[in-house]
Amino acid sequence: MKKIIIGNFKMNPLSFKGAEDLLKAFDIKTKNTVILCPPYIYLKKGENYILGAQNCFYENEGAYTGEISPKMLKDLGCKYVIIGHSERRNILNETDLEINKKIKVCLLNNLKPVLCIGEKLGEDRKEVLKKQLKEDLKGVKDKNIIIAYEPVWAIGTGKTPTSDDILDSFNFIKKIIPESKVLYGGSVNSKNIQEIIQITDGVLVGGASVNKNEFLKMIK
Ligand code: PEP
């Protein structure tokens, strides 16, 4: 079955040339659905990958210095937008209310949200997942979206949950939102991707997605 592989470049690479180089290298035919999310300034459509953004603002237009409208993303050819990444929740203090507004405005613009949810170390996994799904999807009718289960403690740490725990979270989310595609994210690399992809609808890859050789191995 076709799996979804999302590359979240985060705030990388640090040059336009470097970004161009990565996007070109990843523009290859593969058996998977590859969604690339570079920083806003590097957004560029490719032939074989689908374009996504890492964030957007929750209003379509207005005087909001420094923000990016979902309409702008749509115009550039984006089809997906990552919403509620833990780095935005925890470093930039993004709230569930803002996340909910962003999801709604994305859907209004025919952009598919990739909603990131997950517990911090020591938190009750299912309690957090349930609460975030409830608040982030409040009043959202179209639940045909992507949900990425990303335990905060696994992001960029080299640590991953057991396969049993990933599967358990996958089933838990599917039970609440059956229409969604559910991915796993957190320290996915070329060595562990096969095992994880078999028990999910795909993966969200951060750090490893800007390592050219590593990510090429993963998307092939
Ligand atoms: C991410 O940025 O969503 C992520 C999962 O990062 P990493 O793969 O580096 O853990």
Image: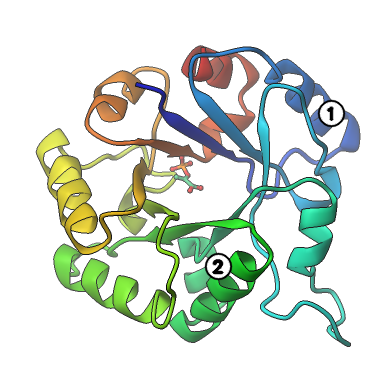
Residue type at mark 1 is: Glu
User: Would you place residue 14 above or below residue 19 in this image?
Assistant: below
Q: Is residue 124 visible?
A: no
Residue 136 vs residue 140, the one in the foreground: 140
User: Would you place residue 71 above or below residue 189 in this image?
Assistant: below
Outermost residue, front side: 141
Q: How many tags in the picture?
A: 2
Residue 43 horizontal side relative to residue 191, left or right: right
Picture quadrant where residue 2 is located: top left
Residue at image coords 77%, 28%: 46
Residue 35 vs residue 176, the one in the foreground: 176
Q: How far apart are the two marked residues, 2 and 1, measured between alpha carbons?
A: 25 Å
x, y percent for residue 189: 42, 26
Residue 20 is marked as 1
x, y percent for residue 208: 53, 30
x, y percent for residue 174: 22, 53
Q: Residues within 10 Å of mark 1 (few under 14, many from 20)?
A: some
Picture quadrant where residue 75 is located: bottom right
x, y percent for residue 85: 50, 61
Q: Tell me the residue that label 2 is attached to.
A: 88
Residue type at mark 2 is: Arg
Picture quadrant where residue 94 is located: bottom right
Residue 12 is marked as none
Residue 208 vs residue 43, the one in the foreground: 43
Residue 184 horizontal side relative to residue 10, left or right: left
